[in-house]
């Protein structure tokens, strides 16, 4: 394959990654831990595709500046090469256990091969361990190139064996997807190692990222299509994760908010106005609580928010901020209707013995009490 063919292949793979990123990007909400791991794999894959393309474009071009650029790119490329496989191992582990605490425990031993690879990559500038850029600016593999490849395969093989042994903890579709992820880069890496000059591993890894996106990330259906907020499923996932990973004495604020007179808006001004009202309500919630908190459309015209708080005073101040933002919105709105919420809120403390579902019912009752008081007023 010539330089143009590699550039076109890498450009196509980058375009695929960009499309995946656009579909999962949230500018106003936080990402869950597994989403952060997936984004790390995606970003590293894109970076390595870009660096690989630059290496091909600079290879053999005689110039001192090109030589320095080639050496710098080769070092970064060599350091980053095992990183997607490392994050993949963490992603597979989290899919099984859903525990950040466990990830923290295994992080140091998992990082050790990356550390040694980084040291060897830096020393390669002087000793040609992983790579060598000759005087004509041509890239050559070093004597320890296969050490770097072995680290990649170590992560991939470990993840595959781990997933197979822990398959009882996984849904069938997730299990198959996790196994399939390793296959394209595994094959691409073998071809690239055996045939010098062939570079297809990161295009193959892009296929793996696409497999995971289609079968796991997007299939979670974690976003409400109308408001752009997370949905009830994602709230349940968030609470399960929080319960597993919360620190001793931690507490979480919960707010249940119901859009008042929603039926009237639909009946008088039509369902399109009702949809607009829901979107506006979601935007007010985003503006009030920001991306550091989880905001969900719980169902119909009900919304639920999980907040990291320091105490009840902090929670009350956040509710007051919501009310202030609602008032400001209505003062400047040209709508024929007003946006108003009935709100129920409290602190969820796992030590109280209350389950998540009981807590939701609790703040739901508080919300309906607020609605009754509003009707009386």
Image (cartoon, rainbow, N blue to C red):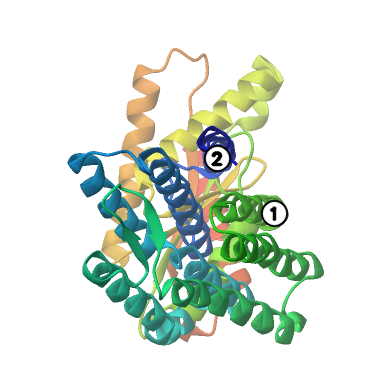
User: Which residue lies at the image location 62% right of the left edge and 33% below the top edge?
Assistant: 226
User: Splitting the image into 4 quarters, where does residue 246 fall?
Assistant: bottom left
Q: Along the horizontal axis of the image, is 14 left or right of 114? A: right
Q: Secondary structure at mark 2?
A: helix
- Looking at the rendered structure, the secondary structure element under dot 1 is helix
Along the line of sight, the residue nearer the viewer: 166 or 148: 148
Residue at 70% across / 65% down in the picture?
A: 183
Residue closer to the observer: 162 or 265: 162
Which residue lies at the image location 48% right of the left edge and 84% below the top edge? 102
Expressed as whole percent of the image width and height from the top left, the position of residue 333 reads 41, 17
In 3D space, how far apart are the residues under numbered discs 1 and 2 (Cα atoms)?
Answer: 22 Å
In-image side of 313 versus 64 (left or right): right
User: Which residue is painted at 51% across and 71% down in the image?
Assistant: 149
Badge 1: residue crowd in 10 Å (few <14, some 14–19, many ≥20): some
Spot the residue most to the left.
64
Dot label at residue 211: 1
Q: Is residue 318 visible?
A: yes
How far across and down, in percent of the image, does residue 164 sit? 73, 82
Task: Please give the residue where the numbered disc 2 appears in the rendered image.
Answer: 6
Q: Earlier in the sequence, mark 1 or mark 2?
A: 2
Observer-nearest of 236 and 318 = 236
Residue 128 horizontal/vertical position (percent): 30, 69
Can I make out residue 308 in this image?
Answer: no
Residue lying furthest front: 136
Q: Is residue 68 above or below residue 325?
A: below
Q: Residues within 10 Å of mark 2 (few under 14, many from 20)?
A: many
Which numbered circle lies on residue 45?
none
């Amino acid at each position: 394959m010539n330089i143009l063919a590699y550039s076109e292949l890498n450009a196509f793979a980058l375009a695929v990654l960009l499309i995946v990123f656009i579909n999962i990007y949230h500018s106003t909400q936080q990402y869950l831990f597994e989403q952060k791991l997936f984004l790390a794999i995606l970003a590293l894959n894109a970076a390595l595709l870009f660096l690989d393309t630059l290496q091909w474009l600079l290879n053999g071009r005689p110039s001192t500046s090109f030589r320095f650029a080639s050496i710098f790119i080769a070092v970064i490329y060599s350091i980053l090469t095992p990183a997607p496989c490392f994050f993949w191992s963490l992603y597979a582990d989290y899919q099984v256990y859903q525990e950040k605490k466990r990830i923290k425990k295994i992080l140091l031993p998992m990082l050790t091969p990356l550390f040694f690879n980084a040291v060897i990559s830096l020393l390669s500038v002087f000793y040609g361990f992983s790579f060598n850029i000759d005087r004509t600016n041509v890239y050559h593999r070093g004597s320890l190139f296969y050490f770097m490849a072995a680290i990649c395969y170590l992560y991939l093989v470990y993840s595959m064996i781990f997933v197979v042994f822990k398959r009882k903890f996984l849904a069938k579709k997730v299990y198959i997807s996790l196994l399939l992820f390793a296959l394209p880069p595994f094959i691409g890496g073998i071809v690239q190692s055996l045939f010098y000059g062939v570079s297809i591993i990161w295009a193959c890894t892009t296929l793996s990222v696409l497999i995971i996106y289609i079968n796991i990330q997007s299939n979670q259906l974690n976003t409400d299509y109308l408001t752009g907020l997370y949905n009830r499923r994602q709230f349940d996932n968030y609470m399960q994760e929080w319960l597993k990973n919360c620190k001793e004495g931690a507490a979480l604020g919960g707010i249940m908010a119901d859009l008042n007179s929603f039926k009237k808006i639909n009946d008088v001004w039509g369902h399109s106005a009702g949809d607009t009202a829901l979107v506006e309500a979601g935007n007010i919630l985003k503006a009030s609580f920001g991306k550091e908190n989880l905001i969900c459309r719980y169902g119909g015209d009900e919304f639920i928010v999980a907040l990291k708080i320091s105490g009840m005073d902090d929670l009350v101040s956040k509710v007051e901020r919501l009310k202030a933002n609602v008032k400001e919105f209505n003062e400047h709105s040209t709508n024929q209707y007003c946006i108003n919420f009935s709100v129920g809120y409290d602190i969820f403390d796992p030590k109280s013995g209350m389950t998540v579902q009981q807590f939701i019912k609790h703040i739901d009752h508080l919300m309906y009490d607020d609605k009754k008081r509003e009707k009386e007023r």
